[in-house]
Image (cartoon, rainbow, N blue to C red):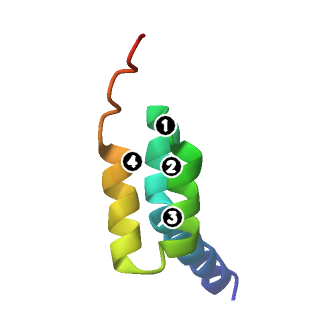
Amino acid sequence: MHVLGLLFFHFIGGWFVMYFLPSIIALVRGKRDTLAIFLLNLFLGWSVIGWIIALVWAAKNDLPAVVR
């Protein structure tokens, strides 16, 4: 019974990491729009399109800030 509980925990943990992978990537890369990526991932990540958009957004390089 203990092994079954451990496997269940790893399954849920793996699902959690995969679901929030775009947010994790944005956080690690120090993106300016990390909060927006997280919110997109949280609310629309259940759809494949929302998850892919969040992943691409997190993986893209930020444009340099324009100095005026």
Question: Residue 16: which quarter of the image?
Answer: bottom right
Q: Are marks 1 and 3 in contact (CB under 8 Å)?
A: no
Q: Are marks 1 and 4 in contact (CB under 8 Å)?
A: no
The disc labelled 2 sits on which kind of residue?
A: Ile
Q: Is residue 17 left or right of residue 48?
A: right
Q: Residue at x 58, y 60 (%)?
A: 39
Task: Measure how far apart labels 4 and 2 are at the Cα level.
Answer: 9 Å
The disc labelled 4 sits on which kind of residue?
A: Ala
Residue 24: which numbered mark, if any? 2
Q: Identify the element where label 1 is drawn.
A: helix
- Percent across and percent down for residue 31 are 47, 36
Q: Residue at x 51, y 63 (%)?
A: 40
**Location of residue 32 with respect to 52 vertically, above or below:** above
Label 1 crowd bin: few (<14), some (14–19), many (20+), radius 10 Å: few
Residue at the disc numbered 4? 58
Q: Nearer the viewer, residue 19 or 48?
A: 48
Instruction: Tell which residue pokes out farthest to the top in this image.
Output: 68
Residue at the disc numbered 1? 28
The disc labelled 3 sits on which kind of residue?
A: Asn
Instruction: Tell me the quadrant of the picture where the N terminus can be found.
Output: bottom right
- Percent across and percent down for residue 26 are 46, 43
Q: Nearer the viewer, residue 9 or 58?
A: 58
Task: Measure how far apart labels 2 and 3 are at the Cα level.
Answer: 10 Å
| N-terminal-most mark, 4 or 2 | 2
Q: Identify the element where label 3 is drawn.
A: helix
| N-terminal-most mark, 1 or 3 | 1
